[in-house]
C-alpha cells in the first residue's frame, strides 16, 4: 500500500504540470498558482502521513517495478525503491517545495508568465521526486536530466534578459560535462555487471564482478561522481551555480539550494557502497577544495543572492566531503538541514529583493530590520543555523561532518587537510553569513531611496519563511546520531539512532567496498576501519568544541567589523588587494574557462567553419565546377560537335550524296538509255582493250 | 554467198541506228520504230549465225520468236503510250519524267 501512496504523491505534481501546460493560460494568474500549490501540499500531506507510518511500522524497504524497455536480452525495469532515505528525502522535497510554491504565489504576482512558472515548478517537483524514488541508475539518469531541464527553463525564465538566457545555457552546458561522465559510469556498470538497478549493481560488485579490476571500478565510481560534481556545482564544475541566480528567487531556493543541487549528494550517497577508497578520497578532496574556495569567494560578493549561491556551493562541498570521508549519515543529514535553512535564506533574500523593488546589491541596503521584521528575524534564524550556532539544525549536522572528518584525518594523518579545510570554512561561513545579515538588516541605511520605499512582503511570502525557520531550528532535534559498531568482515551495526537521523542511518549501506579495502588503499599506516568507526563517536566532543570555536571566531570577527567598526572592510580590501581581487574575480575560473574551453570551442568552431567553407565547400564547389566543366565539354564539344556532328555529318553526306545521285535520275527514259548504251560501249571497249 | 561479217556489220549498223533513234527521238512512236530496228538487228544476227554456223534452223526459229515478240512488244508499248497520251495529252516522251529523283 505504502509504495502506491508515494507514487500517488509523486504523480500529483505531474498532474499539475499536465493541466497547467495545456490550460495554464486559461486558468490564469492566481488560480494556476493555487492549483499547483494545492497539489503540492496534498502530496506533502500524503508523504508526511507515510513518513509517520514508516517510522511507526519500520518496514525494511519496498520495491515496485515494472518492465520498461527491452534491449536485446536485457530487460530494463522502471522501478521504485523506497527505503528510509527515500522517505526522508521525499518528505524533505515535498515540504520545502510546498513552502516555495506558496511563496511563489506572492513572489511571482503580476508576472506575465505566472502560469508557466508554476508549470515548470510542477514538472520540477515531479522530476525531483522521481529522482528520489528511482531504483536504478537509468531511472536516476532520466530524472537527473529532467531536473536539469527544468533548471534550464527556470534559470532562463526571464529570457528577455540576455544574462538570464546566457546563465541558463551555461548551467545546461556545464552540467552536460558531468552528465556525460555520469553516463560513461552507468555504461561501465551495465557493461561489467549487466545490471542497472542499484541493488543489482551492488550485488554483482559484491560478488566480485570487478575482481581484479579495481582501477576500473575506481574509474566507474569517479565517473558516476562526476555527475554529482556537475549537478551539485562542485569544483571544477561549480561555475554555473552563481550565474543560475539570474532565475526568479523561488527557483534559486527550490532548485539551486534545497533540492536539485543536493541530488548530486544524494547520488553519491546511493552509490556509496561501490566507491573504492581511492574514489572516496577523490570525492573528499573535491568536497574540501570546493567548500573552502567558495566560502572565501562568498566573503567579497556583494549581490545578496550570489553570496548565498557561493554559500550553497560551500555547504554542498561539506556534504560531499562528509561522504568522501565515510560520514555517510552526516553528509545526508546535512543535506536535509541545509535544505531547510538554505531554502529559508533564499526565500528571505527574495523577500528582501521584493521589498526593495528588485535591488540585489547589499551595499545599497542596510537597516531593513525595522521595515521587514518577519523577513529579518527568519533570516537571522537561517544565518545562525548555517553558521552552526548550538541547538540549531546546522550545528548538529556540521558537527557530525567535522567529527567524521576528524575521525578520518586521525586515522590517515597524511590527509589532515581534510579536517583543516572544513574547520576553517566553518569560521568563514559564520563570518560571511553574519556580514550578509548585518549589511542587509542592520548597520546604516546606505541608500535612502531604497530604505524609504522598502516594505514587508505579503503574507503568502512570510508564512513559508516562518515555517522554514521553525524547521531550521527543529530539524536537528529530531534525531540522535547512532553508534556504529563493527561486526567484523566489513559488516556494521547501527544502534541508538533515533528520529530523522536514525531514519537516515537505517538506510546506510551495511557494507561498502571501501570498508573492506581501506587498509590496502590508504597505505600500511592506516588503522583498521573497524577501530576507526568505533572511535568515531569519541571524536564528537572534540569536533563540537572545535566547530563551535571556529563559529565563534567568525561571529566575533563579523561583529567587530560590521557592528563595532573596529576593522574597516574597505581598508582590509586595500591591504589585501591581491587576495581581494582574486576573490572578487572568483579565482578567475570563468576567465580560465573562457580562455581555455570556450575559446577552444570557439577556435574549433572557427576551424570547423574554415574547414567547412574552404575544404568541404571547396570540395563540393570544386567537384560541382568540375562536373559543370565536364558537362559543358561533353555537352558543348563532345555532344554538340562530335556526336551531333557525326550524326549531322552522316545525314549531310547522305543529303549531298542523294542530291548528287538524284541528278542522274532524270526520269527521262532517253537519258537512261544513253547512259546504258554508253556504259555498254565502254565496257565492250575496255573488254576488247584488256583482252 | 554473202559473208557472215557483212551480216554482222549490217546488224551492227541496224543496232546503232536503233539506239540512236531511241536516244535522239522524243516521239514515242519514233522510239518504237527504233526498238524495231534493234530487234531486227538481233533477228538478223540469229539468222546469219544459223546460216553460217551450227544447228539446222534454230536461228530462224528464234528469229520468228523475235518477230512475234516484237509484235507483242509493240502492242504493250502502244497501250502504254495510249495511257500516256491520256494522262499528259502528248506522246513526247521527255514530258513523262514523273519518276525523276
Image: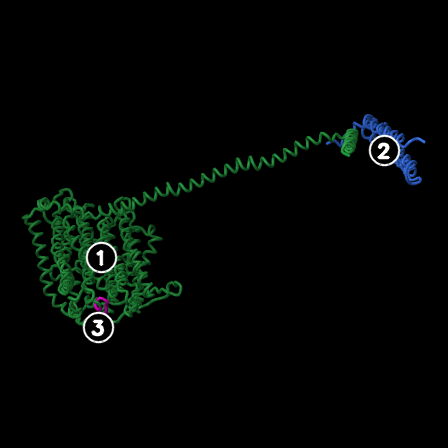
Q: Is residue A263 above or below residue A169?
A: below
Identify the residue position indicated by label 1 in the image. A258
Residue A565 on image: x %, y %? 6, 48
Tags 3 and 1 on a common chain: yes
Answer few, some or many: residues within 10 Å of disc 3's Cα (few below 14, many 20 plus, some between 14 and 19): few
Q: Is residue A441 above or below residue A96?
A: above
Q: Chain of mark 2?
A: B
Identify which residue is drawn at 72% across, 32% down: B101
Report the magenta residues as a range: A510-516
Identify the residue position indicated by label 3 in the image. A489
Answer few, some or many: residues within 10 Å of disc 2's Cα (few below 14, many 20 plus, some between 14 and 19): some
Depth check: A198 or A687 in front? A687
Spatial separation of the CA atoms under disc 2 and disc 3:
137 Å
Mark nearest the camera among 2 and 1 is 2
Q: Colour of chain A?
A: green
* Chain in blue (letter): B
Spatial separation of the CA atoms under disc 2 and disc 1:
127 Å
Residue A24 on image: x %, y %? 33, 52
Q: Chain of mark 3?
A: A
Amino acid at each position: 500500500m505504502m509504495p502506491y501512496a508515494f507514487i500517488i504523491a509523486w504523480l500529483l505534481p505531474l498532474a499539475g504540470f499536465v493541466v497547467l501546460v495545456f490550460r495554464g493560460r486559461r486558468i490564469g494568474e492566481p488560480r494556476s498558482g493555487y492549483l499547483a500549490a494545492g497539489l503540492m501540499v496534498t502530496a506533502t500531506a500524503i508523504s508526511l502521513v507515510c513518513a509517520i507510518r514508516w517510522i511507526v511500522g519500520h518496514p525494511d524497504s519496498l520495491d515496485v517495478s515494472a518492465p520498461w524497455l527491452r534491449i536485446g536480452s536485457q530487460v530494463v525495469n522502471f522501478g521504485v525503491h523506497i527505503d528510509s532515505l527515500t522517505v526522508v528525502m521525499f518528505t524533505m522535497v515535498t515540504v520545502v517545495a510546498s513552502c516555495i510554491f506558496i511563496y511563489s504565489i506572492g513572489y511571482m504576482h503580476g508576472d506575465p508568465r505566472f502560469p508557466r512558472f508554476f508549470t515548470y515548478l510542477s514538472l520540477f517537483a515531479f522530476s525531483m521526486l522521481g529522482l528520489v524514488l528511482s531504483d536504478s541508475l537509468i531511472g536516476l539518469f532520466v530524472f537527473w536530466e529532467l531536473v536539469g531541464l527544468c533548471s534550464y527553463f527556470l534559470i532562463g525564465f526571464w529570457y528577455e534578459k540576455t544574462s538570464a538566457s546566457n546563465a541558463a545555457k551555461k548551467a545546461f552546458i556545464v552540467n552536460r560535462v558531468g552528465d556525460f561522465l555520469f553516463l560513461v559510469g552507468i555504461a561501465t556498470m551495465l557493461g561489467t555487471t549487466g545490471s542497472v538497478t542499484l541493488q543489482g549493481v551492488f550485488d554483482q560488485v559484491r560478488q566480485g564482478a570487478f575482481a581484479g579490476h579495481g582501477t576500473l571500478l575506481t574509474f566507474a565510481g569517479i565517473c558516476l561522481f562526476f555527475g554529482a560534481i556537475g549537478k551539485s556545482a562542485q569544483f571544477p564544475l561549480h561555475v554555473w551555480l552563481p550565474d543560475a541566480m539570474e532565475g526568479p528567487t523561488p527557483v534559486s531556493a527550490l532548485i539551486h539550494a534545497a533540492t536539485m543541487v543536493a541530488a548530486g549528494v544524494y547520488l553519491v550517497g546511493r552509490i556509496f557502497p561501490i566507491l573504492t577508497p581511492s574514489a572516496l578520497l577523490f570525492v573528499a578532496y573535491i568536497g574540501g577544495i570546493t567548500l573552502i574556495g567558495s566560502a572565501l569567494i562568498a566573503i567579497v560578493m556583494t549581490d545578496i543572492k550570489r553570496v548565498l549561491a557561493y554559500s550553497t556551493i560551500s555547504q554542498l562541498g561539506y556534504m560531499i566531503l562528509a561522504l568522501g570521508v565515510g560520514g555517510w549519515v552526516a553528509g545526508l543529514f546535512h543535506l536535509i538541514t541545509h535544505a531547510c535553512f538554505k531554502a529559508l535564506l533564499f526565500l528571505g533574500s527574495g523577500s528582501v529583493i521584493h521589498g526593495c523593488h528588485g535591488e540585489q546589491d547589499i551595499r545599497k541596503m542596510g537597516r531593513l530590520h525595522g521595515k521587514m521584521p518577519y523577513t529579518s528575524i527568519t533570516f537571522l534564524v537561517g544565518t545562525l543555523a548555517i553558521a552552526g550556532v548550538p541547538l540549531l539544525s546546522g550545528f548538529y549536522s556540521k558537527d557530525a561532518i567535522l567529527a567524521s572528518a576528524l575521525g578520518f584525518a586521525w586515522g590517515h594523518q597524511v590527509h589532515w587537510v581534510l579536517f583543516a579545510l572544513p574547520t576553517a570554512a566553518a569560521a568563514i561561513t559564520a563570518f560571511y553569513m553574519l556580514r550578509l545579515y548585518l549589511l542587509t538588516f542592520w548597520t546604516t541605511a546606505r541608500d535612502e531611496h531604497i530604505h524609504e520605499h522598502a516594505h514587508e512582503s505579503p503574507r503568502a511570502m512570510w508564512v513559508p519563511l516562518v515555517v522554514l525557520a521553525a524547521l531550521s531550528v527543529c530539524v536537528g532535534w529530531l534525531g540522535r546520531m547512532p553508534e556504529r559498531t563493527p561486526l567484523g568482515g566489513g559488516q556494521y551495526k547501527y544502534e541508538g539512532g533515533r528520529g530523522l537521523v536514525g531514519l537516515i542511518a537505517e538506510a546506510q549501506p551495511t557494507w561498502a567496498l571501501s570498508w573492506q579495502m581501506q587498509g590496502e588503499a590508504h597505505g600500511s599506516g592506516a588503522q583498521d576501519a573497524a577501530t576507526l568507526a568505533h572511535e568515531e563517536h569519541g571524536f564528537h566532543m572534540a569536533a563540537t568544541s572545535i566547530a563551535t570555536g571556529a563559529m565563534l571566531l567568525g561571529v566575533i570577527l563579523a561583529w567587530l567589523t560590521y557592528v563595532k567598526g573596529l576593522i574597516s572592510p574597505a581598508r582590509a580590501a586595500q591591504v589585501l588587494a591581491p587576495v581581494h581581487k582574486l576573490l572578487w574575480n572568483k579565482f578567475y575560473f570563468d576567465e580560465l574557462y573562457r580562455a581555455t574551453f570556450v575559446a577552444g570551442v570557439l577556435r574549433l568552431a572557427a576551424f570547423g567553419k574554415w574547414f567547412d567553407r574552404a575544404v568541404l565547400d571547396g570540395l563540393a564547389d570544386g567537384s560541382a565546377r568540375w562536373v559543370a566543366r565536364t558537362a559543358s565539354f561533353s555537352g558543348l564539344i563532345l555532344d554538340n560537335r562530335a556526336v551531333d556532328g557525326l550524326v549531322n555529318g552522316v545525314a549531310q553526306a547522305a543529303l549531298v550524296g542523294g542530291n548528287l545521285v538524284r541528278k542522274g535520275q532524270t526520269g527521262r527514259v532517253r537519258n537512261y538509255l544513253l547512259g546504258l548504251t554508253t556504259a555498254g560501249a565502254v565496257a565492250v571497249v575496255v573488254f576488247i582493250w584488256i583482252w | 554467198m554473202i559473208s557472215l561479217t557483212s551480216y554482222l556489220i549490217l546488224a551492227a549498223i541496224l543496232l546503232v541506228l536503233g539506239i540512236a533513234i531511241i536516244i535522239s527521238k522524243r516521239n514515242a512512236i519514233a522510239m518504237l520504230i527504233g526498238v524495231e530496228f534493234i530487234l531486227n538487228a538481233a533477228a538478223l544476227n540469229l539468222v546469219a549465225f544459223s546460216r553460217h554456223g551450227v544447228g539446222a534452223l534454230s536461228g530462224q526459229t528464234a528469229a520468228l520468236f523475235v518477230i512475234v515478240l516484237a509484235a507483242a512488244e509493240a502492242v504493250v508499248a502502244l497501250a502504254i503510250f495510249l495511257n500516256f497520251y491520256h494522262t499528259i495529252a502528248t506522246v513526247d516522251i521527255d514530258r513523262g519524267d514523273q519518276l525523276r529523283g
